[in-house]
Image: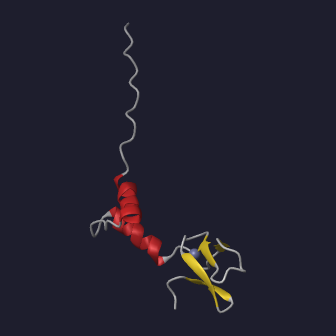
Amino acid sequence: MRLRPRRTPAPPGPDHTRIAVLEHDLLGITPPDGSAAALTIALRATGTCLAHDPIATTTLRDPAPTAVCARCGQCMVYRDGTWQTAKAG
Ligand SMILES: [Zn+2]
């Protein structure tokens, strides 16, 4: 009885969705409507966090303190005594 040589499984192919999301983030290339990458970006933009969790990237003594939300990654600014998303107001 002759044993067949074992075949190693092929390595996974490139993740086209991840590549398209990175192209969007780094190069500003908009993925086609209806694609998985467009859905990923849209869901990320709607906000996956109900309450932001800012991590300061500057000190509060800075004239314009900024932070990044640890949950959704949005840029935040310290304005009127509270952390707000950079897009607001
Ligand atoms: Zn957030």
Farthest front residue in view: 63
- In the displayed structure, 80 sits above or below 37; it is below
Q: Quadrant of ligand 1?
A: bottom right
**Number of numbered tags placed on the structure image:** 0
> In terms of image quadrants, where is residue 32?
bottom left
Q: Is residue 8 above or below residue 21?
A: above
Tell me the residue at 40%/31% (across/down).
Answer: 9
The quadrant where residue 8 appears:
top left
Q: Can you tell which quarter of the image residue 20 is in?
A: bottom left
Residue closest to the eye, 2 or 76: 76
The residue positioned farthest toward the left in the image shown? 32
From what the image shows, is residue 26 above or below residue 44? Answer: above
Which color scheme is applied? Answer: secondary structure
Compared with residue 57, is residue 18 higher up or lower down, i.e. above or below? above
Q: Position of residue 73 (x, y in %)?
A: 55, 70
Q: Position of residue 57 (x, y in %)?
A: 64, 71
Quadrant showing the N terminus: top left
Q: Position of residue 48 (x, y in %)?
A: 53, 73
Q: Residue furthest right?
A: 61
Viewer-side residue, 33 vs 80:
80
Q: Residue at x 62, y 82 (%)?
A: 64
* Percent of width and height locating residue 5: 38, 17
Q: Nearer the viewer, residue 4 or 23?
A: 23
